[in-house]
Amino acid sequence: MKKPEKILVIGIGNEFRGDDAAGLLAAEKLREKNLDHLVIRFNNRDGSALLMLWEGFDNVILIDAVSSDSEPGRIHHVDLLDSSFEEKLTRTSGHNFSIFETVKLAGYVDKVPSNLKLYGIESKNFTMGENPSEAVLTAVDRVVELLSRYKNQEPVI
């Protein structure tokens, strides 16, 4: 029987900007769990760095803080290969190059993983030097719980 392919999880954010640390916090908690089916990486740089981080993986999950009109702590599960995904979730970005722009660039250079999902944690406070809000920390724990049970490219909810 073929061994299942590992899933790459990339936590994205800035640990010094309040809620923007959400992706990094979730990835760190997942790394601490030492789950066999997940490979954990971190990105606190520009979104374009994702192209190098996900190279060689077919199944990629990004975790990042997002900003839309939703309540802080809401978890958005987005298929980034679906052209109808809510662009506004990733357009508001503290990074010079957003996830949306990175996915477009990856398409131009043929470096898009077969499966590319985003767990976006709705965030509001991106103030330098602030701690993440309670709503975001609760959502981080929920995403960790969900991804701990993630199998065969489908979320177990």
Image (cartoon, helix red, strand yellow):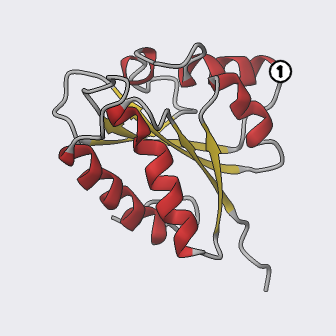
Q: Which residue is farthest bottom?
A: 1
Tell me the residue at 41%/62% (across/down): 144
Which residue in the rendered view is the most extreme toward the front? 129
Question: In the picture, residue 1 is in which quadrant?
Answer: bottom right
Q: Quadrant of residue 136?
A: top left
Q: Residue at x 50, y 46 (%)?
A: 24
- Total residue callouts: 1
Name above or below for residue 124 compared with residue 36. above
x%, y% of residue 65?
39, 34
Q: Is residue 7 left or right of residue 80?
A: right
Q: Position of residue 98 (x, y in %)?
A: 55, 19
Please tell me whether mark 1 sits on a helix, a strand or a loop.
loop
Amino acid at the residue labelled 1: Val
Q: Nearer the viewer, residue 91 or 79?
A: 91
95 lies left or right of 149: right
Q: Residue 138 at what x, y percent from top left?
A: 24, 54
Closest to the observer, 43 or 155 = 43
- Classify residue 28 as left or right of residue 76: right
Q: Residue at x 47, y 19 (%)?
A: 94
- Indicate left or right for 56 with 32 as reference: right
Residue at figure coordinates x 45%, y 54% from the top left? 26
> What crowding class fits label 1: few (fewer than 14 Cα within 10 Å), some (14-19), or many (20 or more)?
few
| Viewer-proximal residue among 91 and 157 | 91
Residue 44, relative to residue 135: is it above or below? above
Residue located beneath label 1 in the image: 109
Across and down, in percent, residue 106 comes to 74, 24
